[in-house]
Image: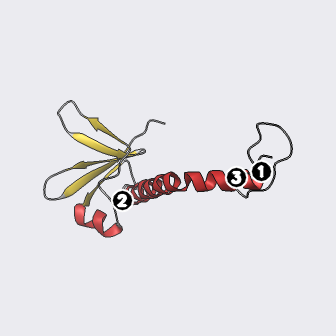
Amino acid sequence: MRECLECGEKIIGRSDKKFCSDMCRNAYNNKLNSDSNNFVRNVNNTLRKNRRILEEACKDDKAKISKASLLREGFDFGFFTNTRTTQKGSTYYFVYEYGYLALENDLFLVVKDRKP
């Protein structure tokens, strides 16, 4: 007899069935994927926090904010979704639709991309 991969109960039904119930199948797959899910969840949480901070700083289409203010709010400069380089060679770092550009004196220009 075949046994459920999760609970060890005997399996009744199709010959290729691996679990005795949907509950066991879900529990098995949740355990199997929990490490990668935690990593992805943590990255997404950091990106959402960065986006919220930039959104609050940029009430209009653009604003200037100090690096100290961003760090105080908990902004993590290591997490962004994409970059764009201007024709002049300046690089904007984007967190979804909000981008930031390093200026002089530890200031940052925050912009909102109007493209959907």
Q: Give the residue displayed 24% in from the left and 54% down from the top.
A: 108
State the CA–CA distance, disc 2 to disc 1.
Answer: 46 Å
Q: Give the residue displayed 56% in from the left and 51% down from the top.
A: 33
Q: Give the residue displayed 39% in from the left and 57% down from the top.
A: 50
**SS for callout 1:** helix
Of 104 and 35, which appears nearest the observer? 35
Pointer 2 or 1: first along the chain: 1
**Circle 1 sits on which residue?**
22
Amino acid under disc 2: Ala
Between marks 2 and 1 in the image, the one whose residue lies nearer the viewer: 1
| Numbered tag placed on residue 57 in the rendering | 2
Residue 111, image x and y in percent?
34, 47
**SS for callout 3:** helix
State the CA–CA distance, disc 2 to disc 3.
Answer: 41 Å
* Position of 17 relative to 35 (above/below): above
Name of the residue lying farthest toward the left: 105
Is 48 placed left or right of 18 in the picture?
left
Pointer 2 or 3: first along the chain: 3
